[in-house]
């Protein structure tokens, strides 16, 4: 029901700067927020852009456990490896490690994490998981000097999918297929989705990686990732993930394999959106 409500809201509301209608210039990439929510008060959490903003919410993971392979450090909320932040040696947030815990996904049949050549095995806080690392500067060129400071919180979005580095276009491609990404639907308060190698022509869901770029007003505003299973929350911890019903899947991702519906019905699906804009809850779709 909340998905229908949000669509209605996005269709009838007009913000003073026409944000809900998708009219205007590209939005400045100056913030870091995570988790879509129909109610902005229960999502769109701000995460620190620098270690100076940390306020002791996150603790550093030892280098051997983090095993990042780049000159950077890993920080997570205590006893919660689900969403961790990567900082360069200057203290700039240069990436996110998003983890799907074994305890939340091990019962899923028909999806093979090792086969993807995308996830790394992690054991932060002695909690085993399959993790994806998304970087906001080129990890292959990162040095001890860190990311060069700019007015934006990212240089680009870099992610290794199926063993190959992908860089999300900064401009909305506005085509059905751009490289390995397929244009799906826009959803109010989320944005225009482009999913990695997601098309109804596929017939084997064990091969898919539900990673997506998010666009608004012609520009990149974020990224997201989904998986099959039921998300857990750390004791006294933050509820990071969005539970997506089949109705939501159909509305957001119309061009999908039939096996996706089966897995969602059987095991559930959860996701997280990450944004680089200040007010993602004002994203609209009417003119996207």
Image: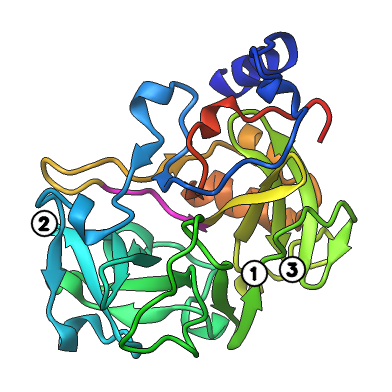
Residue 207 in picture, x, y percent from top left:
64, 75
Position of the N terminus, as image quadrant, is top right
Q: Earlier in the sequence, mark 3 or mark 1?
A: 3
- What residue span does the magenta drawing correspond to? 226-232
Measured along the vertical axis of the image, is residue 190 above or below residue 91? above
Identify the image quadrant of residue 65.
bottom left
Question: Which corner quadrant of the image does residue 90 belong to?
Answer: bottom left
Distance of mark 3 from mark 1, alpha carbons? 7 Å
> CB atoms at circles 3 and 1 under 8 Å apart?
yes
Mark before the other along the chain sequence, 2 or 1: 2
Q: Residue at x 49, y 24 (%)?
A: 38
| Residue 78 circle label | 2
User: Pointer 1: what residue?
Assistant: 208
Q: Tell me if residue 99 is in the magenta stretch.
A: no
Which one is closest to the eye, mark 3 or mark 2?
2
Find the distance from the CA under tag 2 to the CA under tag 1.
Answer: 31 Å
Q: From this view, report whether residue 121 is shown above or below residue 171.
A: below
Residue marked by disc 3: 197
């Amino acid at each position: 029901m909340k998905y229908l409500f949000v669509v209605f809201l996005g269709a009838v509301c007009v913000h003073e700067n026409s944000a809900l209608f998708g009219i205007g210039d590209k939005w400045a990439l100056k913030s870091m927020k995570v988790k879509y929510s129909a109610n902005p008060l229960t999502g769109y959490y701000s995460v620190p852009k620098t270690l100076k903003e940390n306020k002791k919410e996150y603790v550093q993971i030892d280098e051997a456990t983090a095993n990042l392979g780049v000159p950077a450090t890993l920080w997570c909320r205590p006893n919660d490896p689900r969403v961790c932040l990567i900082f360069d040696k200057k203290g700039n947030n240069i990436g996110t490690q998003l983890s799907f815990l074994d305890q939340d996904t091990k019962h899923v049949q028909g999806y093979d994490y090792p086969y993807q050549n995308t996830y790394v095995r992690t054991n932060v806080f002695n909690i085993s998981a399959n993790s994806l690392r998304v970087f906001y500067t080129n990890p292959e060129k990162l040095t001890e000097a860190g990311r060069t400071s700019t007015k934006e919180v990212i240089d680009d979005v870099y992610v290794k999918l199926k063993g190959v580095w992908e860089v999300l276009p900064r401009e909305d491609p506005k085509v059905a297929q751009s490289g390995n990404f397929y244009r799906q639907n826009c959803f109010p308060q989320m944005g225009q989705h482009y999913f990695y190698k997601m098309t109804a022509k596929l017939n084997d869901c064990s091969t898919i990686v539900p990673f997506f770029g998010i666009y608004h007003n012609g520009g990149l505003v974020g990224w997201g990732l989904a998986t099959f299973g039921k998300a857990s929350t750390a004791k006294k911890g933050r509820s990071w993930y969005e539970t997506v019903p089949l109705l939501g899947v159909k509305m957001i991702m119309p061009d999908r394999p039939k096996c996706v519906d089966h897995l969602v019905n059987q095991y559930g699906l959860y996701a997280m959106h990450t944004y680089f804009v200040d007010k993602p809850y004002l994203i609209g779709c009417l003119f996207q």
